[in-house]
Image: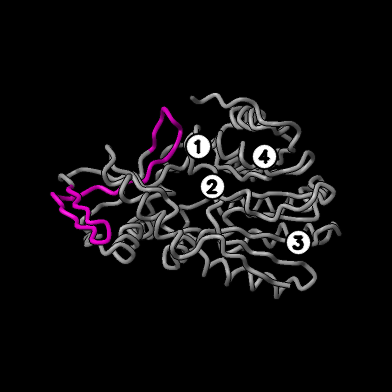
Amino acid sequence: MFRIDRKLTTGDLDKALRQDVTEGLTFRPKQLPPKWFYDTHGSALFEDITQLPEYYPTRAERTILERHADEIAEVADAKTLVELGSGSGIKTRLLLAAMRRHGRLSRFVPVDVSGDFLAESAARLAEDHPDVEVHAVVCDFEKHLDLLPTGENDQPLLMAVLGSTIGNQDPRQRAVFLREIRTNLHVGDGLLLGVDLVKDPVRLVAAYDDAQGITAAFNRNVLSVINRELDADFDTMAFDHLAIWNTDEEWIEMRLRARENVHVHVGALDLEVDFTAGEEIRTEISAKFRREGLADELETAGFAPGPWWTDPDGDFALTLATAVHAPSELRYG
């Protein structure tokens, strides 16, 4: 059975985009949230990125699932799988298959902000798994976790956040997000996190600045979205793509840098934006993790850190945490 709930209407998305663009382009320094990369074209570009030789995270995470999905399914012992930021669902198939082999899975809830892309991938999964209820939800999972069908206390659930999606948040945002996840789970429910690990900065930068320029096109796509949705006149090719390793924060920053002085009119917002030559917009951070630091964050959010699986090269990790108590007081004021 397949159904899809759209918690985000076109009006909701338009309002959120307007707010993010207004705040982000008038902020100093300028910044835009990465969720606006993922229209249909951006989602397809990201799938292309996952196939690039430089971009190891998807392959590494898939390798972990190929080797350990059955063990994960056995430890989690869940009847419902909720995946936040499900995308195409390619890696999810490995986890779904293992959970079905374990004999407990009855429902899959894929969640994403890109409605058309989610509908297509979730419908294919429902076709391939007719014995599993597929209940897709279009929403901004950073804001709408309380709207998800997380089930009853006697129906054990596994929530998965794969692809190091959590790395797109800074520590303050992660603390709030993990706390919200915990609040919407029952004691004993599981959280499966995929995280990219700290490694040689040369490899990290290459993964976000590929030789073919696909990541550059993906980065500039956020400007194309603003042009289309908000009647803006960005010349997307007037901005260079940058990927920079921030040593202090241990994250990659993706930026767009103006090649020359640029003036942009955003018609729907009646907003005039000026860029000086060399001025940048930060469009994404991608934090890299260490096991000890992530364990501390999970414990503060009310989880007991559990098993930890990595690929043979130690590039990426999956960890399974269990909801055990209410979140501790946030450490960020």
Going by the numbered disc 2, the residue's amino acid type is: Glu
Residue denoted by label 3:
107
- What x and y, as percent, mark residue 178? 60, 38
The answer to whether the residues at label 1 and label 2 have Cβ atoms under 8 Å apart is yes
Going by the numbered disc 4, the residue's amino acid type is: Thr
* Residue displayed at 72% across by 73% down: 128
Residue denoted by label 4:
183
Marked residue nearer the N-terminal end (3 or 2): 3
Going by the numbered disc 3, the residue's amino acid type is: Arg
User: Marks 4 and 3: which is nearer the front?
Assistant: 4
Classified by dominant secondary structure, the portion drawn in magenta counts as strand
Q: How far separated are the C-alphas under marks 3 and 1?
A: 29 Å
Q: Quadrant of residue 1?
A: bottom right
Label 4, secondary structure: give it: helix
Residue denoted by label 1:
173
Question: What crowding class fits label 3: few (fewer than 14 Cα within 10 Å), some (14-19), or many (20 or more)?
Answer: many
Label 2, secondary structure: give it: loop
Going by the numbered disc 1, the residue's amino acid type is: Gln
Q: How far separated are the C-alphas under marks 2 and 4?
A: 13 Å
Q: Residue furthest bottom?
A: 127
Q: How far separated are the C-alphas under marks 4 and 3?
A: 21 Å
